[in-house]
Image (spheres, helix red, strand yellow):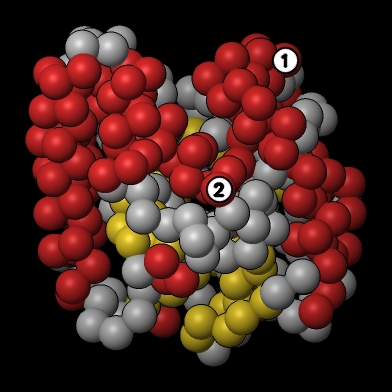
Amino acid sequence: MTTFQVADGVHGIDAELFDLGFLSAYLFNDAEPTLVDPGHAAGAETVLDGVRDCGVDPADIKHVVCSHVHVDHAGAASTILDAAPEADVYIHEMTAPHLADPSELIASSREAMGEYFDHMGEQGPVPEDRIEMVSSDGTTLDIGANTLELRHLPGHSPDHFAIWNAERDLLFAAECLGGYLERATNFFPPSTLPNFDVALIEEAIAHLQELDPEHVLFPHFGAWPGDSAAVFEHAERELHRYDERILALHDETGAAEETKARVRADLMDISPPYDPAVAEFYTSLVTDGYLKYHDRL
């Protein structure tokens, strides 16, 4: 289990999905400790150990915030709430029912992810009376000396929130910008089935860039190193570079599986240092997301 500090009172926790350095949860250690994106179901105990390592008793957690309902971001919610009896979970109202009854979400995720779903684990239901449904207007949590503002920015998924901590000048970008795997110095666009939308991601990038944050955090993975302004340039460039290249490869191969093989060889230069499962997982998500967006899947 690995934890790391990204700002005063803010700690990342490696949820250890597939490999180290691929998926992180974040603990905001304020008067009302808050866990942001608790991660996948199979990693819940790892995240709870990380909370303890950061000096917080899980029973003291007051809020759990899920940027969106995908199983690698919200799947651990039920286990976390079992350990945090005073906490509620915040999620967009359109997907809140999938936390209360995750059966359809589990089935669709298993179909989309295939063998990789087994790494996620099956999540349990969250009691309805512990779910705070957030509309597209967003909401702001007062957690002590700091606030966490949930901003609805679809594109990666329709229910997607980014979280802005104005007092620390800190942005949890969730998957509005994509993912950055530091050990491979590789940046990925936030494409995935079934609702990835390039135009909406462009809007999200522009919206978040106006905040001019000092710190930018990713669930995949960690804090952006160096000048935070550069992250928006990377996000915009890679969004369109992958778009153009994946369509070109699909034109050449004529089939999704052959396109994935070429994407893996041409664009996914991350294994090593990461486990090959990371490369295969990202290859499938990124390729399918763009092909579906362009009605080719």
Q: Earlier in the sequence, mark 1 or mark 2?
A: 1
Task: Give the image quarter of residue 72.
Answer: top right
Which quadrant holds the C terminus? top left
**Residue of label 1:** 103
- What residue sits 59% from the left and 15% below the top? 111
* Image coords of residue 107 (percent x, y): 66, 14
Give the side of residue 243 with respect to residue 28, left or right. left
Q: Is residue 176 above or below residue 116?
A: below
Q: Is residue 26 above or below residue 109?
A: below
Q: Is residue 125 above or below residue 242?
A: above
**Residue of label 2:** 276
> Amino acid under label 1?
Ser
10 Å neighbourhood of mark 1: few (<14), some, or many (≥20)? some
Q: Residue most toward the bottom?
A: 8
Give the side of residue 159 with respect to residue 99, left or right. left
- What residue sits 21% from the left and 56% below the top? 235
- From the image, state whether disc 1 or disc 2 is nearer to you: 2
* Image coords of residue 124 (percent x, y): 81, 30
Task: Give the image quarter of residue 89.
Answer: top right
